[in-house]
Amino acid sequence: MALSKSLYTHLTKVVLIILGLTLLFISDDLLLLLLVGELRIWYFTNWVFLLVALFILLINVLLAWAVYTAFKRKPTTGAEGMIGKTGIALEDFLGSGRVLINGEIWQAAASVKIKRGEAVRVQSLTGLIVKVTKEPGQN
C-alpha cells in the first residue's frame, strides 16, 4: 500500500520532531548520569540510579509535551486574532468612529449608534478599519 504524499510528510515531521526532542532533552541527561556513574563521584545504588533516571525522563517528557503544545497552538495575530476582541468606544458615532482595542486606537465602522464609553466587539477587519457591534448585554 502506497502512502499519500501528505501522510508521508506528516509522518516524517512527527518522526523528526520526536528524534529532535530526544536529542535535545534526553541525551544530555543520560550522558550526565553515565558520566556520574563512571567517575564514581557519588556512589549510588542501582535503585537510586534508576529512580533518578526515571525522574529526569519524566521531566523531559513534560518539557517535550510543553514544546509540542506551544508549536500546536495557532498564533492569534493579524485579522484572525482581532475578531471577537472587545474594546471601548472613544466617541459617539454611527457609521464611523474611533475605538480602543488592546490599548490601540482603531478606526471603526458600525451599523448601529454607539455611545462613548460603550463596550464593542470586533466582527471583522478590513484593512485598518474594524467593523464593530455593541457588546451583547448593553442597551
Image (tube, rainbow, N blue to C red):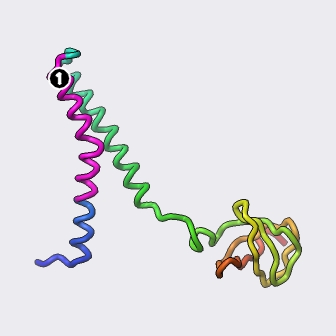
Question: Which residues are the magenta region?
Answer: 16-40
Q: Is residue 32 left or right of residue 131?
A: left
Q: Is residue 67 left or right of residue 101?
A: left
Q: Quadrant of the N terminus?
A: bottom left
Q: Is residue 122 left or right of residue 33?
A: right
Task: Judge the density around disc 1: few (<14), some (14-19), many (≥20) Cα neighbours within 10 Å.
Answer: some
State whether the magenta stretch is mostly helix, strand or loop. helix
**Picture coordinates of residue 71 (x, y %)?**
41, 58
Q: Is residue 128 left or right of residue 43?
A: right
Q: Say if the magenta span includes residue 5.
A: no
Q: Give the residue at mark 1.
A: 37
Q: Say if the magenta span includes residue 28.
A: yes
Q: Nearer the viewer, residue 5 or 104?
A: 104
Residue at image location 25% in from the left, 27% down from the top: 51
**Picture coordinates of residue 6 (x, y %)?**
26, 76
Give the quarter of the image for residue 111.
bottom right
Residue at image location 85% in from the left, 72% down from the top: 139
Q: Does dot 1 land on a helix, a strand or a loop? A: helix
**Picture coordinates of residue 118 (x, y %)?**
83, 67
Q: Nearer the viewer, residue 105 or 86?
A: 105
Q: Is residue 11 above or below residue 27?
A: below
